[in-house]
Image (spheres, rainbow, N blue to C red):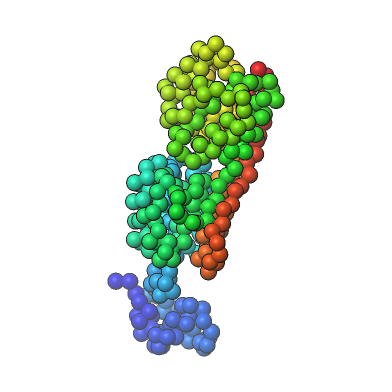
Amino acid sequence: MRPTMKDVASAAGVALKTVSRVVNGEPGVNPATAERVREAIEQLGYSRNESARVLRRGRTATIGLVIEDVADPFYSGLSRAVEDVAIEHGCLLLSGSSGEEPERERELVLTFCARRVDGLIVVPAGDDHSYLRPELEAGTPAVFVDRPPGPGIEADTVLADNADGARQAIAHLRRSGHRRIAFLGDHPSIFTAAERLRGYRATLGELFDERLVSMRAPDLDTVRADLECMFALEDPPTAVFTGNGRLTVTALRALKGRPMALVGFDDFELADLLDPGVTVVAQDPSGLGRVAAELLFRRLSGDSGPAEHVQLPVELIARGSGELPA
C-alpha cells in the first residue's frame, strides 16, 4: 500500500492537519516541526494524491483533444501546441484520432466527457454536434479548431483563412502567366476543402473549368488517373494547386518527370530542399492549437462571454515550383 498522510503524521508525531499544511506549502508550521514532517515524507516515500486534490476542487485537471490523425504532421503540430498550454496550466492532455469518421469523433468526445475532462478541443469530422449539447449546457466548455461546429452549436472556433490562402495561390500562378490551373482537393464535405475550392473558384472567375477540379481521397492511383484525364483535354492545365500537404506530396509523385508549376496548401518537411523547392501556402498549426487552448483555459477561468470566432492568416512562401512560367 502507498503511504498516506496519516502514516506521515504518525511517523512524525504530528497532527494530520500539520502534514497537510507542510505538503501544500501553507504557513503556520514551526520550522523544526516542518523539517520533521519532510523527513518522514522522504523516509516513507509519500507522494501527494493529485487526483484527489483536484477532484476536491471540482476539476480533474485534464482536457480532451480530438483531431483527425495524430500521425499527420499538421495535427501533431497542433496537438503539441495544445499540450504545451495545458502543461502551463497544470493540466494533462488526453487525445485521440477520429480518422475523419463522425461516429469515431462522437465516441471519443463522449468518452472524454465520461472521464470528466474539464474542457474539450475538437477538430470536427462531421457536421452534427447535437450530441455535445447536453455537455455544453452542463458547463463543459468546448473549442472547435480548424473547422467550425455543425448548425445549432455556438462555441469558440479557431480557423485558418482557407479561402484567402487559395486566392493567394491562384493569384500567384496567374502572375506567372497560367490560365489553366488544376485543383486537387480533399472530399468537398470537409470544411477546409470546400473553403479552398471556394477561394480557387472565385479567383479564377470566368477561367474556372469544372474539368480541372478533382476532389477525392489523396491516393496515388486516383491522383495520377485524374491528372491524366486533365492532360488529355484539348486545353490541358499548365499548373496545379493542391489542397493539402498529403495531396501535394502525392501530386509530386504522380508528376515525376513532368515539369509543371505547382503551389500546395500546407507546408511540409523538406519542401525547400526539392528541386525546384515547393511553393506553398503555409498555415500555422501551432498557432491554431495555441489560440484554441488559450481560449479554452480562459473559459475554464470563468469567462462567460459570447462565443468567439478567430481566423488566423496564412502566408504564401515562394520557393520555385509556383514560379515556373506557363
Q: Residue at x 35, y 82 (%)?
A: 6
As displayed, is residue 170 above or below residue 20?
Answer: above
Q: Nearer the viewer, residue 31 or 219?
A: 219
Q: Position of residue 165 (x, y in %)?
A: 61, 37
Q: Residue at x 55, y 22 (%)?
A: 209
Q: Quadrant of the C terminus?
A: top right
- Disc tally is 0
Report the side of 50 relative to 212 (left or right): left
* Residue 266 location, quadrant: top right
Report the side of 320 relative to 307 (left or right): right
**Whether residue 141 is visible:** yes
**Whether residue 249 is visible:** no
Q: Residue at x 47, y 16 (%)?
A: 229
* Residue 134 location, quadrant: bottom left
Q: Residue furthest front?
A: 206
Q: Position of residue 186 (x, y in %)?
A: 47, 33
Q: Nearer the viewer, residue 117 or 43?
A: 117
As displayed, is residue 146 above or below residue 265?
Answer: below
Q: Quadrant of the N terminus?
A: bottom left
Q: Nearer the viewer, residue 306 or 56?
A: 306
Q: Residue at x 59, y 52 (%)?
A: 310
Q: Residue furthest left?
A: 1
Q: Position of residue 319 (x, y in %)?
A: 66, 29
As displayed, is residue 90 above or below residue 207?
Answer: below
